[in-house]
Amino acid sequence: MNLFTIAWKSILQRRLASCLTALSIGLGVMLMVLVLVIFGAVDSAFTQRSVGYDLIIGPKGSDLQLVLSAVYRMQPPIENLPYLYLDQIRRDRRVISAVPLAFGDVTEIGAFPIVGTTTEYFENEYMPGQSFRIRGTRISALFDAIIGAEVARENGWDVGSRFSIIHGGAESEDVHDEQFTVVAVLDTTGTANDRTVFLNLDGFYAIDGHEKPIDEVEKRLRDFYAADTERLSLAMNQLQEYRSRASGNPENAPAGGVKTYNSPDAMKEVTAILVRTRPETPFDAISLSAELQKGFQAMAVNPVRPIQRLMTGLLGNIQKALVVLTAIIILVSGVGIFVSIYNSMADRRREIGIMRALGAGRHHVFGIVLAESALLCLGGAIAGWLAGHGLAVATAPWVIRQTGLLINPWSMNTLEFVLFPVVGGLAVLVGFLPAMTAYRTNVADALSS
């Protein structure tokens, strides 16, 4: 009979105490596994692997808010840019793709964010090396829509489904009259695209209530192009023509809540512009960003840097704090195992004496106690590891629905690979003193007690 078999029989004799001490280790390991799985999913979502663009151009303001709004759809947009500015960016020799985004509404069912964009958005990679897989057709009609995988799953929508949207956000009760038709469904991407509804940008502009008063638009354009008289003149000419056309021809007025006329570019706005620069000249993105930073019209943000600051400055510290907390829980559990084994030594003096009398050496007794400590610690750790990943498997669908994070419940963090050696070392530490007590037990005294 080997040492571990004897140690296991000793544990079975004190089932309740042994299970409780192992459970404390298991709970600590389970908590640590959950922390690592969740933060692993967050780290995967908020890294460069999730962004397929070199720059995001938006109004002056917080770079972090711009990225969280344009890429992750977790913050309201800062402000809007004139649509004419999009054409200005597209004409820049350094830019090979400039995709407009227009935000502002949510779906009536599920309150999923609405994004007005162009077909170019789906032709670009949503992350390096990853292209969209779409089931359905391209957006062609004015009120066509493409929906993300989570939108389709939660709302039960598919190609051909029709839906309405709410103006201004989930808190509003202003439902637009327009009905949109799903023409395609995106495959799961593990990004915010899964929880987004994409509209034809022209259809987004045609929605009743999305157009600002002409006087307000004129003021904003004058402020934006104060130093660019040529583009300001072009914009003012378009506004003047639009004002005359809308007021002088009743047939061009809105009918039934749906615009039947085309607004000029000067009346349109975009929330952000996703930019890809020439890959053969990596300094194009840096020079374009620096150039815009000097001006007052807009800013260009590398989508990775604000998120890295967020991860290292806030989320990274939270992760470290939670890992340290769970490590303390495991350490305290180890102390509990030490107390349990050490206190049991007084009741096991006669048992140890009999083992010694039957021929067991001191080192055998020492090894049995260490084996018992190892079984309790490592057994609890294995059970906690399985429970942690099992709980992650069970809750992953709910977390995905609530946050949009694509969680792999069985993904392994590097800390998990060192977890079991550390727990093994803890088992040796907490079992050493009780093992030495058993090692020093006097056979005669033990048998006479």
Image: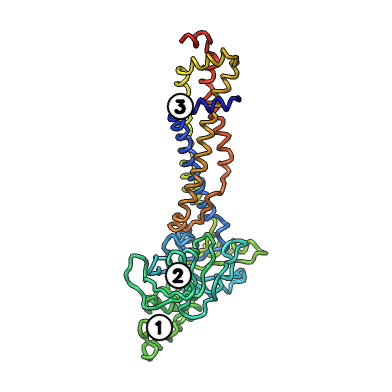
Looking at the image, tell me whether mark 2 or mark 3 is earlier in sequence order.
3
In the picture shown, does residue 245 fall above or below 366? below
User: Where is residue 428 shown, x and y percent of the image?
Assistant: 55, 26
Q: Residue furthest toward the right?
A: 280
Cα–Cα span, label 1 and label 3: 79 Å
Q: Is residue 226 visible?
A: no
The residue sitting at 35% across, 84% down in the picture is: 256
Is 10 in front, or is 303? 10
Q: How is the image coloured?
A: rainbow
Answer left or right for 215 relative to 347.
Answer: left
Image point (38%, 79%), residue name: 214
Q: Which residue is mark 1?
A: 259
Residue 219 at x, y percent in the picture: 39, 75
What residue sits right under mark 2 in the picture?
157
Give amino acid for label 3.
Answer: Arg
Q: How far apart are the alpha carbons under marks 2 and 3?
A: 57 Å
The residue that label 3 is drawn on is: 14
- Answer yes or no: do the residues labelled 1 and 3 have beta carbons within 8 Å? no
Query: Which sits in the foreground, 274 or 178?
Result: 178
Q: Quadrant of the N terminus?
A: top right
Q: Residue at x 45, y 17 (%)?
A: 346
Is residue 287 toward the left or the right of residue 239 in the image?
right
